[in-house]
Image: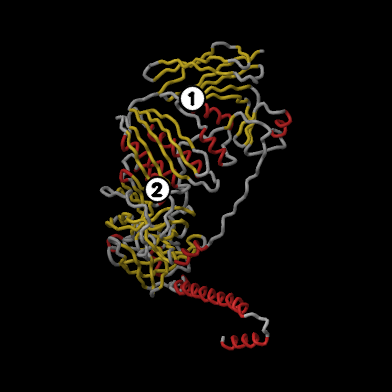
Amino acid sequence: MKAVMNNRKHVTKNRPDVDKRSFRRTLWPATLLLVFASTLGDIRAWEGQHRQNFLPLSEVKPGLKGVGRTVFHGDKVEEFQVEILGVLENIAPKQSAILARLSGGPLENTGVMGGMSGSPVYVNGKIIGAVAFSFPFSKEAIAGITPIQQMLEIFDKSEEPLRVDPIQIDVSSVKPHHTLEVRPAAELLDLRQLMSRSFSVAQSSPEIASSLLPLRGQPFTYIDTPLLLSGFSSRVIPMIEKVFRPLGMNLIQAGGLTLGSGSDKVADGSDIQPGSALAVQLIRGDLGVGASVTGTVTYREGNQIYAFGHPWLSVGPVQLPFSKATVLSLLPNLNNSFKIAAPTELVGSITQDRSQGLFGTVGVLPKMIPLTINLKSSRNKLETFRYEVANDRILTPLLMNFTIFNTITSNERALGESTLQVQGKISVKGQPEIKIENLFSGEANSQLFASLAVVQPLSYILGSGFDNIDVENVTVDITSVDEKRTVNLDRVWVDRDQVKAGETVILSAFLRAANGGEHVEKIPVDIPPDMPLGTLLVTVADGLTLTTVENRSLRQSFTPRDLDQLIRAINNIRKNDRVYVRLQRPEPSVVLRGEEFSTLPPSFGSVITSDRSSSSTLSTMRSSNLYEYELPSTPYVITGQRSLTIEVVD
């Protein structure tokens, strides 16, 4: 460096036109470049030094001995002994597993436990992977270990997902009369087929190690994950178990624990280390309601953590808060023992759930969705309940359904006559409010339908596939009455059977209650001024019946073209507590991308219904829905349908 500087001085002396400030400007960028290169080299050296502490899978041999780390009680990380039995190659595409015998501590009595998922294993001071598999009903603590390279490599891939812009079709030249509505399904998404959790040791293979011969043909699975629940009623537990038990989760009712409370501030996570217990929180809130799954941290790199060593749900990108956890007890079991651990301080966010484990960041707290329920009980008492639910496209509707149903059944009768009025809103950033309004009455399932009335619109929004959906909060008002309020649409009649365009006819609807009470509803129907001459079919029905008839004739699922259309369709969902009147013509119409078009110009209709044209978003109907009237709400759930005809004359 000295020789270079002397040379620079010599050149400067021989060229007096070169200013010294120019020389300094030339030197600074070079100096910064050297500093940057040195810093980058230090960073790469640090990363290389840390990842040199990995023992490659090719060097893992039967007979090697090492230690594992996990929490058996409280929050203290303890060691257990490990003896390598062999390596199973290709248990899944590009995935292998190390089989090992564990010993020490309580493992002689418990075997491999739920909650140990992710416990790191070291040989000669180098990490080889995470405890992730177990052999059910095994008399020994035989475990499968996910190699550490597999865990890190799957999260090192950072390619953006491919996106394809939708095809746009302009149909603005024809004005639609009616937007078809979405209709809630009976159940939410079934998660049970998300993935396979079972594997087996080959019956015979020339490459199998002699130490693995006693395990030939034996099945092994991902270690079950403890799902700790508090504050849930006995009516809700079977619902949760039906969803999560097939996915390898052991439900533990935490009587006496309050999991849902606690600060929403991010605590210091500097003490999170390999072997630490962590709890992924799903629900927090009033009534002591809480739900969390427990596992173990495998590896930490700066503020990034790797955990579990196997998928939880394998749903990819997620936003799930995780906290420190304290192990309260160990529960030995012939099938699968497990830890009972309670979450404590929030310390970070799980952002990836993939086939080799969970990935998250310490010090970052994801946004949960606030849920507020204002419940006016049958005793005329108003109470407000506040919760926070994990923000996830798949999990949020399920978790919110459990929470709302639990709030109702914990405060109101679960069986017997009841009527529930539901009103509320779902706030999505940058979008119109999604309105919730309906009435349910019966003797058994009113509470479940009331919950679904809130949750299914949310499921439509989160599962729509549209980008940048930010659900800010959900607010629900529920009024409960301990009686059955239902009426049947018995018959309808009209004051005259001929009418001119622009006039009003009076429809009378005869409603009969379940207790024998009778009521006549007078319905003024305005005939539009532009209504052509001819026969009009007038249908009077409740919302559910009208939608069922419509879907039967349409035979096409609703596919929204954008988020705005989806929200409009949700807000137009027909209600149970009112009468609908529809005017129809016996003329064909078409439905394109959820919009119905009637009285089409001949040229337009012939083109889109031609045999030379085909579309999954287009279908034809034998009649045209010209107008539909929604009458004011009633305090009853209405069922029934009646039809009649009138003539529009000159």
The answer to whether residue 197 is left or right of residue 159 is: left
Image position, residue 566 (x, y; %):
55, 38
Structural distance between the alpha carbons of marks 1 and 2: 36 Å
Residue ID at (71%, 32%) = 604
Residue that label 1 marks: 542
Q: Identify the secondary structure beneath mark 1.
A: strand
Q: For the N terminus, which image quadrant?
A: bottom right
Residue ID at (41%, 41%) = 401
The answer to whether residue 371 is left or right of residue 230 is: right
Compare marks 1 and 2 and give the one earlier in the sequence: 2
Q: Identify the secondary structure beneath mark 2.
A: helix
Res. 488 image quadrant: top left
- The amino acid type of the residue labelled 1 equals Asp
In depth, the one of 113 and 599 nearer the eye is 599
Q: For the C terminus, which image quadrant?
A: top right
Furthest-right residue in this view:
603
Mark in front: 1 vs 2: 1
Image position, residue 43 (x, y; %):
49, 72
Query: Would residue 307 be visible to someone looking at this image?
Result: yes
Residue that label 2 marks: 244
The answer to whether residue 137 is left or right of residue 33 is: left
Query: Would residue 337 be visible to someone looking at this image?
Result: no
Q: Mark 2 packing: few (<14 Cα in 10 Å), some, or many (20+)? A: some
In depth, the one of 320 and 214 nearer the eye is 320
Image position, residue 145 (x, y; %):
41, 64
Q: Is residue 345 above or below residue 603?
A: below
Image position, residue 322 (x, y; %):
39, 56
Q: Mark 1 packing: few (<14 Cα in 10 Å), some, or many (20+)? A: many
In depth, the one of 356 and 401 nearer the eye is 401
- The amino acid type of the residue labelled 2 equals Phe
